[in-house]
Amino acid sequence: MPRHKTTWIVMADGTRALIVTRRDVPEGFDVVADLSSEVAHVPAHLIASERPGRTQESHSPARHAIEPRHDPHEERLAAFVGSVAAYLNEQSAAKAFDHLILFAPPRALGQIRDMLDDSAKAKVSAQAAKDLTKMPLEDLPKHLAALP
């Protein structure tokens, strides 16, 4: 007897990822994983512990702070998205799902897609650039119906 195909639906942003699968009886969804970033809501000024470097103006005695090259808050958000992609890669290798549907804001969606390995990318059957992390699960079927 063939195995039932499992579809995981991923709703993610830079701070939270909810992974669900459709339940046959009774209708609804089962939560596979609810991942969240512990440090995502920490203000950027608390992440960087030191004052920014200073530079001297070449034609006057004025000194100015040097802006960091990377926003530490954005780096933490990207690290969380990377951990979500790593989890999906790991579960794909373990054959935990057959199909994957991704919902995420455009930037997070692109980052997740870029970090998925070939096995997990091949299982992506649909995706949409929407943030559904705060939406009740009862509203999910209408978003699934709108997918191509």
Image: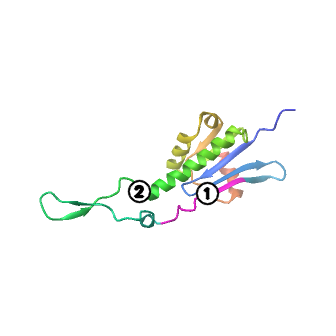
Is residue 36 found left or right of 77 in the rendered image? Answer: right
Determine which of the numbered discs, if any, sits on residue 89 in the image: none
| Res 100 quadrant in image | top right
How does the figure colour the protein chain or chains?
rainbow
The residue nearer to you, when weighing 17 against 56, is 56
What percent of the width, then of the height, locates residue 104? Answer: 57, 50
Q: Residue 113 or 36: which is nearer the viewer?
A: 36
Q: Position of residue 118 (x, y in %)?
A: 60, 33
50 to the left or right of 79: left
Residue at x-position 52% and y-position 64%: 41
Q: Position of residue 80 (x, y in %)?
A: 55, 53
Q: Residues within 10 Å of mark 1 (few under 14, many from 20)?
A: some
Residue at point 64% right, 49% down?
10
Q: In the drawing, does residue 118 fall left or right of residue 3?
A: left
Q: Type of residue at label 2?
A: Asp
- Please determine whether, in this image, residue 125 is positioned above or below residue 41: above
Does the residue at mark 1 contact the one at mark 2 (Cβ under 8 Å)?
no
Q: Which of 61/114 is in front? A: 61
Question: At 61% across and 57% down in the image, what residue appears?
Answer: 133
Which label sits on residue 133? Answer: 1
Residue numbers of the magenta segment: 32-42
Location of residue 4 by image quarter: top right
Secondary element type, mark 1: loop
Residue 123 locus on image (x, y percent): 66, 36
Q: Amino acid at mark 1?
A: Thr
Mark 2 highlights which residue? 71
Task: Name the front one of labels 1 and 2.
Answer: 2
**Quarter holding the N terminus?**
top right
